[in-house]
Image (spheres, rainbow, N blue to C red):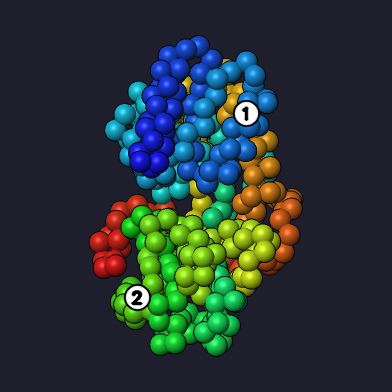
Amino acid sequence: MKKIIIGLLAACACLLTIMQKQEANTIIVYSSMEQFRNDELQKQLNQKFPDLHVFVMYMPTAKAAARIHVEQENTDADIVVNLETAYLEMIKDQLAPSSQFSKLDYLADAKSPDDRYVIWDRQAGSIIVNKDVIKKHHLDIPKTYDDLLKPEYKGLIAMPDPKSSGTGYFFYKNLVNKLGEKAALNYIDRLAVNVKQFSESGSGPVKLLIQGEVAIGLGLTFQGVNESNNGNHFEILRPEFGSPYSLTGAGIIKGREHNKDIQRVYSFIINDFLVYDKEYFSPEPILKQQVNRIPHYPKDIQYADMNGIEDLKEKERLLSLWKY
């Protein structure tokens, strides 16, 4: 009953937001960030623009892109935030040129390939180990991808499902890039024997690690570090092929770029809040002179070969080969 009530309240909130869209000074932001980051964005927007009704609505990246692709310029969204660049490429015809609003100095490998969106963050992964669970089972901490295939880790590993998680896909894509398609698929078949769960979301492995249900998770580095800072006995391992990653971006829906209020909100999001988000939440480097205020975050991270990560057709092809 509780879940039903929560679902009804969420539906009512969405309906109210859509109704309020008809009012003047109402701006809707589709965001694919985690809820705590969305909450902070909403808080800062409320403080910065008391004269506007700005609503931050969580929308998974694939769902947001699909919705905008169908609704096109009639979508309720005015601004999109944290959509994977592969999906932004899919809907870029529905986005307005907006890079001119950005005032930040990006790293060479984090510059947007198109002026219809700016890069929002780099989502990077690591092998995360719950040292308490490893100790409980009298096991050694793995050091390589091949170590994860050892029989003693059976039922103690979690990985996001690439079909529903961008995190899962970038681990998968990096293995294909590094090993070749045939060898990567063979590796996944052998790894699956030890996997307790291919989680629906990218945060799933970290949640299972917190609960002590698995000892090893392929997950987002910043989530693992945050939970370690919160008291969990985690160790963050650098994958031998480098840290796999994908980039996300932000943009304005075509037709809304001439609205001065939307310009104000978008400019604040991609300049001011983006810097705050990198400093305190998602610190993988995308900017020159970027500051990281998260304690114990890995330094001098080597990033993996992610060639083709933005190719949506290739992603669909590789996912068609995924059996789990």
Evaluate whether residue 27 shows in this view. Answer: yes
Secondary structure, mark 2, is helix
Rendered image: mark on residue 192: 2
Looking at the rendering, which quadrant does residue 38 occupy? top right
Q: Residues within 10 Å of mark 2 (few under 14, many from 20)?
A: some
Estimate the x, y position of residue 55 in percent, counting from the top left.
Answer: 52, 27
Estimate the x, y position of residue 88 in percent, counting from the top left.
Answer: 42, 42
Residue at coordinates 64% horizontally, 21% vertically from top-left? Answer: 49
Vertical order, 189 against 319 (above or below): below
Rendered image: mark on residue 126: none
Judged left or right of residue 30, residue 275 is right
Quarter of the N terminus within the rendering: top left
**Amino acid marked by disc 1:** Leu
Marks 1 and 2 close (CB-CB < 8 Å): no
Residue at coordinates 52% horizontally, 84% vertically from top-left? Answer: 137
Estimate the x, y position of residue 101 in percent, counting from the top left.
Answer: 60, 30
Q: CA distance from mark 1 to mark 2?
A: 44 Å
**Amino acid marked by disc 2:** Ala
Residue at coordinates 63% horizontally, 26% vertically from top-left? Answer: 46
**Which residue was labeled with disc 1?**
45
The residue lying toward the viewer, choosing from 243 and 16, is: 16
Judged left or right of residue 148, residue 276 is right
